[in-house]
Amino acid sequence: MPDRQVGLQRGLIRCLVPRREFPFLSPAWAAVIVYTTQVNIAIIVGNGPSVDALPVEFWLTAWQRNVLLIGTNRALALTATANLEHDVLVMRDRYTQLWLKQELGAKYHTELWKPNRAYKVGSASSRTAHCNEYVAMTDSWQHDVEYDRNRELLIGQNDSVVLMATNWAWLVGIRSIGLVGVDYYGGHASMIDPYNASTRGVGGALANNMDSIERQFGTAVKEMTRSGGEIVNLSPATQLRSVPKMHWKSFLG
C-alpha cells in the first residue's frame, strides 16, 4: 500500500498546520479547522476478531476514499493493521494494562506507540501513554467542543476505547463513522509476535458488562443520528445490537 501523503490535502490531524499558525488553539480545536474542510468520514478500529475477516480490498478502498483511520489500544500490534499508516491512535487506559505481561505493554509503548507518526489521544485520568492530547471524561455524550478547568477537551464517560474515539472524532468534525473489530464475542484479533504470546489485559473483561456497553453505544447512535451524523458497525458477525450493521462496501460507496 502506498505511503499516505502527509499534509492538509489529505486532512491529517498529525500535520496540525493550524496549530502552528495559531498556537493559542488547543490541538482539538486546530483539528476542527483541518477536518471541517477536509475529512468527514472515519473508520475506527477496535481489537475484536472481525478485523481479521476484512479483506485487503477494504483497507485499500478506505485509503483511496481518504477515510480517516483511527486505531485504538493494540492497533499497532494487530496482524491486520500493524503495517497500515494510522491517522489517529487512541488509548483509554494505561499501556501496562493492555497485556497481562506488563513488559509487553511497555515494549509496545516504547517501540510501536511512541515512534508512530499518528496523532495520539489519551485519557487525562491516566496520562501514562505518550500522547499529543489528553481528554477528560464527563457525564454524557458531548456534542460541542468544551473544556474542563485544565483546558482539556471533554468527552462522554464510557467503558470502551471505541466510544472514546467516537466522541473525540465527532468533536473534531467527523460526521460518518464506521466501526470494525467491535464484536464482543470470539476473543481478540490476531497479533504479531511477540504480542501474540500473552493474554490481553483487563480490557478483555468488557464483554462481561454488555448491558452497560449496549446502553453507551446506543446513546452514541441516538445522539449522532439526531444531529445529522451516522455511525454503523462494519464488523462481520458482531454481537453488539445497539449499532446498526452495514456491509463495508455500502459504507465506503
Image: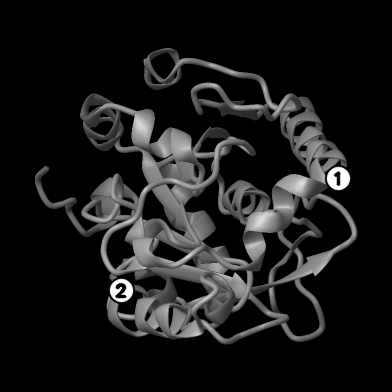
Which of the image's four quarters has the C terminus? top left
Work out whether residue 33 or residue 216 is closer to the camera in this orientation and state it: 216
The quarter of the picture where residue 1 lies is top left
At a point 65% along the width and 29% down the height, the residue shown is 229
At which x and y percent is residue 104?
Answer: 41, 78
Residue at image point 38% right, 21% down = 252
Against 39, residue 53 (above or below) is: above
Query: Circle 1 — which element?
Result: helix
In the picture, measured across the screen, residue 9 lies left or right of residue 18, that is: left
What's the CA distance linking mark 2 and mark 1?
32 Å
Sequence-wise, the earlier of marks 2 and 1 is: 2
Q: Which residue is mark 2?
A: 112
Of helix, strand and loop, which one carries label 2? Answer: helix
Of 228 and 129, which appears nearest the observer?
129
Local crowd size for mark 1, using a 10 Å CA cut-off: few (<14), some (14–19), many (≥20): some
Residue 38 can be seen in this image: no
Q: For this view, does 53 lie left or right of residue 42?
A: left
Can you give x and y, in whole percent of width and height, for residue 54 in the image? 34, 29
Question: What type is the residue that disc 2 sits on?
Answer: Leu
Percent position of residue 48, x then y? 51, 43
Q: Is residue 5 left or right of residue 167?
A: left
Q: Vertical placement of 50 versus 18: above or below? A: above
Q: Position of residue 238 (x, y in %)?
A: 59, 27
**Which mark, by number, is residue 13?**
none
Amino acid bearing label 1: Ser
Residue at mark 1: 212
